[in-house]
Structure formats: structure tokens, C-alpha cells
Image (cartoon, grey):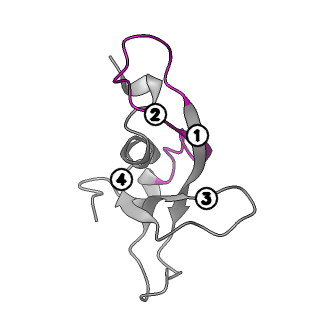
Amino acid sequence: MRIGTVRPEEAKVYDSHAGYHRFHTDNAYEYGPQEPYGSFEVFWEDGTNDFGDGPVPGGWYWAAGFPGCLYDGEPSGPFAYSQQAHEDADEWAPEYNA
């Protein structure tokens, strides 16, 4: 697990990026904003469920999919913080471009 020195009960508190978000196109173009597309969810998994291959470690995960629908593939994670899961899913989000 990529939780490092953060205890799971502490990691769950940092949920600033929990919920559904949209992916963004990369910023390869000089003109115009990045375009949003698709959808993904950032969520906390406490380690009691499995994603088809047995129990998974607790932590933050992300998975592509729209609200109310099944995920489009396996979730990615675990991550120590919801922001890390969000950034892994959408590295081109405007908030990560400096």
C-alpha cells in the first residue's frame, strides 16, 4: 500500500477529492483550455471488499465510470490520499498544471 507513514484512519479523513470527476485532455495545445471528458470516481475502500481477485488493501482508489453505472475496468490504488488518486486518474486536470 502506498500509505507510507499515514495510518488508514488518518488517510480517510483527507477526502478533499472524493466523489465523481471528469478526465481532461492533455495540455499539448497552445491555445484553449483543456477539455473535460468521461467520468471517474475517487473513493475510500476499507479493505473489506474485493474487486474480483480477493480482498484489497484499505486506501483511496479511483475507477473510470459514470454515476449509477458499473466501473469500466478495475479500480487503481491504493493511495494514501484522495488527491493522489485523483492526480493519478487525471494528470491533466487544470489544478495540477503549474
The prevailing secondary structure element of the residues shown in magenta is loop
Q: Which residue is mark 3?
A: 65
Q: CA distance from mark 1 to mark 2?
A: 7 Å
Q: Which residue is mark 4?
A: 80
Q: Earlier in the sequence, mark 1 or mark 3?
A: 1
Provide residue 5's location: percent of width, then percent of height. Answer: 24, 54
Q: Which amino acid does the dot numbered 4 rest on?
A: Ala
Q: Which residue is mark 1?
A: 37
Which residue: 48% across, 86% down? 52
User: Above or below — where is 1 with respect to 80?
Assistant: below
Task: Tell whether position 25 is magenta.
Answer: yes
Which residue: 43% across, 10% down? 31
Which residue: 42% across, 52% down? 11
Residue stretch in magenta: 12-35
SS at mark 2? loop
Q: Which residue is mark 2?
A: 25
Q: Which amino acid does the dot numbered 2 rest on?
A: Thr
Marks 4 & 3, CB-CB < 8 Å contact = no
Q: CA distance from mark 4 to mark 3?
A: 22 Å
Q: Which amino acid does the dot numbered 3 rest on?
A: Gly
Which residue: 45% across, 31% down? 93
Marks 1 & 2, CB-CB < 8 Å contact = yes
Provide residue 60's location: percent of width, then percent of height. Answer: 45, 57
Eye-nearest disc, 4 or 2? 2
- Within 10 Å of disc 2 (Cα), the crowding (few <14, some 14-19, many 20+) is some
SS at mark 1? strand
